Image (cartoon, grey):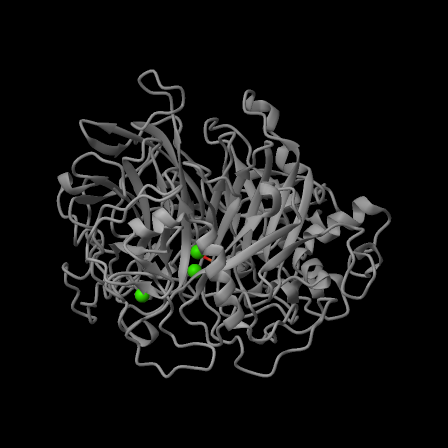
């Protein structure tokens, strides 16, 4: 996600300089070698054709990548980067297109504005839809997603022909959402309501008939969850004084304060739904990322270093200006100057039961409050459940939440509130390739040697009060205990334990951090009071590159193959980069990365963001670089999706994208023969006066009904979900 009103998370709001381990790259590399070689048999290495860490030696281009333990192999050839970037104003369908390998077909499954429930109006292409229309249409700028199978042909909720596709709608681009953009004098509550209606989650019933996927447009299971949907707040922070906020009656035309204060156990809406998660008991998790940008102030907003709310606003980036969003000018619920506790109801993971269209979404406070990217679950060998989560902002942290109760496979309802009780941890990555999960609990010791309950930021009447504050101020608690500042943690993904692979092994994309190591390190401020944006940590073992424009992927293994472990080992799976870069190397960054591909450079990519293991053990990575085929990405073309072998690192490029978009979100049907992939914000930065200045996708590529969705009206580019199948009906990736 990027753009004027929703900028990249390039601003650091972490003022601390926790865990600054100086340059130990050489040590990392040698130990990393041991880690990788320990994870793959000698026979598998031999069959892969003489792999070394530096790349493939003497391999034949386009030979299939053979299976190896826990990995089923790759059968497609890397496709070239899409370098024919369209110069505005001429947009050619050739470059402004999704491309996949030979033998695969990608079509549009659903796009912004498509009707997804009874009474939904077709997309006009003119942005003339009202908020009421948008409430029955697929939301804008889709991101994370998951396919929940429905019953079908005798398969108990295991159908690969019928299911509910839950899709996040991360943000809106007002220049495309309204015919006249977000103009000052013309900005009304009607615009706010439409924008709010385009946020959240879209639940779409997907059906495959005669080999063709389509949206069940009148499905009773179709649903929109938006910035105004009523929700419960549960877990340790529910009901806390900081969660009690002004109560409003919300209608189509006004938000009217009742004069009452909420009980802190209810909320309205979810916003900036970036990446996602799902649970083994069949619920969807939507993660609130840049929610701070949706707030603003008609008067001064408290950013004092001396007040509790001021410190929170500073640490989380809540300000009067926000990201330029104007909701607060017409909807006082979003005006932090008059409604200062409302932001505390955002920054959570929200659990949704997609199978019950009447279910009330629940904000699960036990999982902590930050800028949540994704939430990847692992059920370990003892049925303990953990969720692994990144906080996507420069120099923020990686977390895990361990449920107190065990997963009950036989009784779905028994897991209903599993996410309400447990322990939240934050990761410290040490230079010796071990790490520690630091608990965020009242008794946890801070770097100052005192328990968090004695820290003035978290002290309270009792430990329940202290824990609520720790969760509402998760970032500040993580500062206090000395977590490792990371290069923007995006998605997490867990490697399936199949075909002899038994470890709890989790990966996380660290998308970039172009200020690490670029200046004198900032001071640590464990009380969270330092001004925002000051963190400039030096390189460390887990984040070894200064000016890390291309990002990397870190992974860790839990001790004893148990999610309960507080100790783990880790290594860097890959440093992304451009093997043909002309950029002048820095002492800690050659910008070339170490992607394993043959020939060298054939699968280069940068800014990894989306990351997911399919059930068969293939690792899929999607990119979110800023600048198609220019600047640091001059040789990398448009954003892409690659597939990688977790044992050897061998990588192949599977998909390239249209102009000025991001590839984000992916899921598969249970049989692995259909993949859904998200294309977000094609033609980003276009203005209302010329919506197709940079992209005419998807209608430019898919012109006819048989190519995908019906009636693709011209007029404006649309974020969309692709459906990808293999022409021989095989499993995606084979
Ligand atoms: Fe919305 Fe961090 O990506
Ligand atoms: Ca390479
Ligand atoms: Ca992302
Ligand atoms: Ca990103």
Q: Please state the horizontal and vertical placement of residue 147, each as a whole percent of the image.
A: 38, 35
Q: Is residue 291 above or below residue 314?
A: above
Q: Identify which residue, 643 or 648, lies in the foreground.
A: 648
The quadrant where residue 574 appears:
bottom left
Q: Identify which residue, 404 or 89, lies in the foreground.
A: 404
Q: Please state the horizontal and vertical placement of residue 626, each as a whole percent of the image.
A: 36, 68
Q: Is residue 504 left or right of residue 167?
A: right
Residue at the limit of the structure toward the top, as seen here = 154
Q: Is residue 341 left or right of residue 658?
A: right
Query: Who's the residue at 47% across and 51% down the image?
Result: 38
Query: Who's the residue at 69% across and 50% down the image?
Result: 471
Q: Quadrant of ligand 4?
A: bottom left
Residue 654 in view of the camera? yes
Q: Please state the horizontal and vertical placement of residue 281, each as a whole percent of the image.
A: 52, 29
Q: Quadrant of the C terminus?
A: top left
Q: Is residue 474 above or below residue 552?
A: above
Q: Is residue 698 left or right of residue 346?
A: left
Q: Quadrant of the N terminus?
A: bottom left
Q: Identify which residue, 120 or 312, lies in the foreground.
A: 312
Q: Is residue 354 above or below residue 80?
A: above
Query: Who's the residue at 30% across and 40% down the image?
Result: 675
The quadrant where residue 617 appears:
top left
Residue 644 in view of the camera? no
């Amino acid at each position: 996600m990027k753009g004027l009103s929703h900028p990249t998370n390039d601003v650091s709001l972490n003022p601390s300089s926790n865990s600054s381990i100086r340059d130990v790259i050489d040590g990392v590399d040698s130990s990393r070698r041991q880690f990788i070689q320990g994870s793959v048999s000698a026979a598998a290495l031999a069959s892969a054709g003489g792999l070394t860490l530096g790349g493939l030696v003497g391999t034949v281009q386009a030979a299939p990548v053979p299976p190896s333990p826990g990995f089923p192999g790759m059968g497609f050839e890397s496709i070239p980067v899409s370098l024919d970037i369209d110069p505005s104003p001429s947009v050619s369908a050739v470059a402004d297109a999704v491309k996949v390998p030979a033998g695969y077909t990608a079509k549009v499954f659903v796009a912004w504005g498509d009707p997804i429930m009874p009474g939904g109006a077709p997309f006009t292409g003119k942005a003339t839809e009202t908020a009421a229309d948008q409430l029955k249409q697929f939301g804008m700028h889709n991101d994370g997603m998951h396919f929940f199978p429905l019953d079908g042909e005798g398969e108990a909720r295991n159908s690969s022909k019928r299911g509910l596709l839950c899709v996040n709608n991360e943000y809106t681009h007002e220049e495309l959402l309204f015919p006249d953009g977000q103009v000052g004098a013309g900005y009304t509550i009607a615009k706010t309501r439409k924008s709010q209606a385009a946020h959240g989650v879209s639940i779409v019933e997907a059906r495959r008939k005669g080999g063709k996927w389509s949206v069940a447009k009148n499905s009773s299971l179709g649903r929109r969850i938006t910035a105004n949907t009523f929700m419960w707040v549960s877990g340790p922070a529910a009901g806390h004084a900081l969660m009690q906020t002004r109560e409003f009656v919300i209608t189509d035309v006004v938000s009217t304060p009742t004069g009452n204060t909420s009980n802190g156990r209810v909320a309205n809406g979810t916003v900036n739904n970036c990446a996602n998660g799902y649970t083994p008991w069949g619920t969807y998790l939507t993660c609130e990322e840049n929610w701070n940008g949706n707030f603003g102030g008609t008067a001064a907003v408290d950013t004092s270093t001396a007040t509790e709310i001021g410190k929170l606003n500073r640490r989380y980036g809540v300000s009067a200006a926000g990201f330029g969003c104007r909701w607060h000018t017409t909807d006082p619920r979003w005006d932090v100057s008059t409604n200062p506790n409302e932001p505390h109801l955002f920054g959570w993971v929200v659990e949704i039961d997609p199978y019950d269209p009447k279910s009330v979404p629940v904000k699960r406070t036990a999982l902590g409050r930050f800028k949540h990217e994704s939430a990847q679950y692992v059920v370990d060998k003892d049925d303990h459940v953990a969720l692994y989560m990144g906080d996507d902002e420069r120099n923020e942290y990686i977390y895990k939440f361990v449920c107190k109760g065990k997963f009950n496979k036989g009784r779905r309802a028994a897991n209903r509130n599993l996410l309400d009780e447990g322990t939240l941890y934050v990761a410290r990555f040490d230079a010796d390739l071990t790490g520690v999960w630091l608990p965020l609990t009242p008794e946890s010791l801070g770097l100052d040697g005192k328990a968090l309950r004695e820290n003035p930021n978290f002290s309270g009447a009792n430990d329940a009060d202290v824990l609520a504050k720790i969760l509402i101020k998760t970032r500040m608690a993580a500062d206090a205990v000395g977590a490792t500042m990371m290069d923007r943690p995006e998605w997490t993904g867990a490697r399936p334990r199949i075909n002899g692979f038994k470890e709890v092994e989790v990966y996380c994309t660290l998308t970039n951090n172009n200020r690490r190591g670029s200046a004198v390190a900032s001071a640590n401020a464990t009380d969270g009071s330092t001004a925002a944006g000051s963190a400039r940590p030096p390189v460390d073992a887990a984040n070894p590159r200064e000016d890390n424009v291309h990002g990397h992927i870190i992974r860790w293994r839990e001790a004893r193959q148990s999610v309960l472990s507080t100790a783990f080992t880790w290594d860097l799976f890959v440093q992304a980069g451009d093997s043909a870069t002309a950029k002048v190397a820095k002492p800690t960054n050659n910008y070339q990365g170490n992607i394993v591909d043959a020939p060298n450079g054939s699968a280069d990519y940068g800014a990894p963001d989306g990351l997911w293991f399919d059930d068969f053990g293939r690792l899929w990575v999607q990119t979110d670089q800023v600048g198609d085929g220019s600047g640091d990405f001059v040789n990398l073309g448009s954003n892409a999706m690659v597939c990688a072998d977790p044992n050897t690192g061998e990588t192949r490029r599977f998909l390239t994208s249209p102009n000025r978009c991001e590839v984000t979100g992916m899921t598969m049907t249970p049989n692995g023969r259909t993949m859904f992939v998200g294309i977000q914000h094609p033609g980003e930065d276009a203005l209302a006066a010329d919506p197709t200045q940079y992209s005419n996708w998807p209608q430019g590529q898919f012109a006819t009904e048989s190519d995908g969705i019906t009636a693709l009206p011209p007029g404006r580019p649309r974020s969309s979900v692709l459906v990808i199948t293999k022409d021989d009906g095989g499993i995606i990736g084979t």
